[in-house]
Structures are given as structure tokens and as C-alpha cells.
Image (tube, helix red, strand yellow):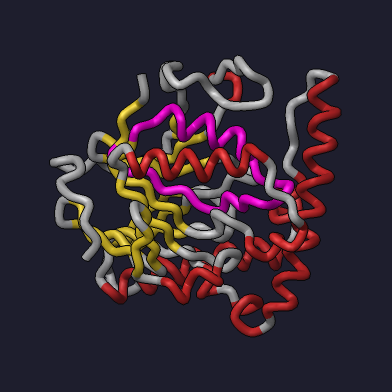
Amino acid sequence: MKRAVDIIVLSDVHLGTYGCHARELLNYLKSVRPKALVLNGDIFDIWYFKKSYFPKEHLEVVRRVLKMAADGTKVYYLTGNHDDLLRKFGEMSFGLVHLRNKLVFQIDGKTHWVFHGDVFDASIQRARWLARLGGEGYDLLIRINRLINATRNLFGLPPVSFAARVKKSVKGAVKYISDFEDTAIQLAAEKGYDYVICGHIHRPQIRQVTAANGHQVTYMNSGDWVEHLTALEFNNGQWSIYQYDASLYEVVNPRLHVPEREPAMYRLRREEVPPSTNGLAAFEPI
């Protein structure tokens, strides 16, 4: 039986790249039954489509999302920088999937502002070629990382994330992430929003901050499915970070997926905000 969830927000899947953990994401999607699914940018990686890499597992993720929509889940696809070609179609609906550049909705009178976050990235806005060059290097690092982790697994060693280590060790990267979060919080406060939800920087997080104008904002980031394998979930009146745990999923077919009727298995990281009083009162964009 699938686990019922009010809202799921996930981002930075990067379908079409070697670093994408499509099989793990498919396991997760097949274990839940959300009322609303928000895909907050970089679900596809159009920058790398020229490489002609799009394996079966990646296609299965697309099929799963469409099936969820057909079964009644409201699906909103918000554009990011790696799928920015879709921005010209913003505010359109394609059958059961609603394409948006941003999303604003309310839960219990609290306004949530959702967008990918690449608008804060100067390297993308001013020098797209430089951003793509950096993306090529990141993709190579992820591929090497996966090969090394496969070797470590043979010896019973836990996986390591080189990308995360690089980000933590480079002062510029640390400052960029901090500036990104602070900017998102400040803008949300100026607009009077209570929650701001982003992706883009591949750093899952939930934290409450009192902005300079005294307005309290909850900043949330859904992370990614390249390094962290995380999503944001709203259920029973509160937000949590979902953390994928491979040990909780029994692999029946090593090439694909979880059985349709396998019980939902999950683990929540306890970075939660206080629960709302009435749960999900409504999920309608405003």
C-alpha cells in the first residue's frame, strides 16, 4: 500500500545525465501517493541531450509521473536553468501536467513561494557558456564518484560524495550557497511570503529565519537526486525532508523498480517546521 502524502516537492533530478539516480527516484515515486507533486526545476537536463544518453530508468521516471497525474495527483512542472527551453511555455498546461515558472499557494493562510532559484545565479544569467562549462566538469566529477563508490561497495565501504567535499572546502562555493539562501529569504520577506522553496544548489534544508524587516520566513530546499536523493514532503500539517535509504527498499528485479504493491518505505530527516493547525486546507495556485 502506498504512503499518502499531501505535497511532494522535488528538484534537480537531471534526467539525461550519468549522475541522475533515476532508479532510486522511481522506487520513491512508486511508494507514495501525493495529492500534489511539484517538480521544481532541472528535472530534465536539456543541456546534455546532445549526448544521446537517456536510459530506460530515466524514461520510466517520466512514465511514473504521468501515471501519477492520470491517477489524480496534481502535477506542476516548474522550469529551471537546465530545462530553461521550457520557459517560453510557462503558464501553460499540457494535458495533466501544468507548466509554470513559479508557483504561489497557501496552506492555513501561510503563503508559499516556489521557484527553482537560478535567477540568483550570475554565472547563468550573464555567461551561459561558462555555466555550461562548469556543468560539464560537475557531470564528470559525478561519474568518477559513482565508479569509486561502486568499488567501495565491493569492499563493504560506505559511499562518499566528492562534490559535497569540494563545495565544503572551497570558500567561494560556501559563500555562494550562503548568499543564495540569504537572498531568497530576503526577497520572500519583502514580498510578505511566509515560506520560500527552492532547488538549484543541491543542498536540502529547512530553516526558519527572521528577516531584516522582522518578517519570519521559512526557507526550504528540496535538494537533488544526484548527490543527496532528497525531497520535501508536507503531511499531517508539517514539512519534512525525505531522505532516500536504499536499505529500506527490497530490489526484486535488479534492473528496475519496486513492486507495485510493496509497502511504502521511507525515512524522514527531522528537520521539520512546526505543524499547521488544519493540515492541507487547499493546494490551489494564487
* Residue at image coords 27%, 69%: 214
Q: Position of residue 163 (x, y in %)?
A: 73, 50
> Would residue 46 be found to the left or right of residue 8 on screen?
right
Q: Position of residue 237 (x, y in %)?
A: 23, 39
Quarter of image, res 49: bottom right
Q: Residue furthest toward the bottom? A: 126
Magenta-drawn segment? 6-33
The answer to whether residue 218 is above or below residue 120 is above
* Residue at image coords 59%, 80%: 125
Quarter of image, res 58: top right
Q: Is residue 195 magenta?
A: no
The answer to whether residue 157 is above or below residue 53 is above
Q: Which image quadrant: the N terminus?
A: top left
* Residue at image coords 24%, 34%: 236
> Would residue 40 be found to the left or right of residue 6 on screen?
right
Is residue 160 visible to us here?
yes
Q: Is residue 26 magenta?
A: yes
Q: Position of residue 243 (x, y in %)?
A: 51, 34
Is residue 179 visible to us here?
no
Q: Residue furthest toward the front? A: 95
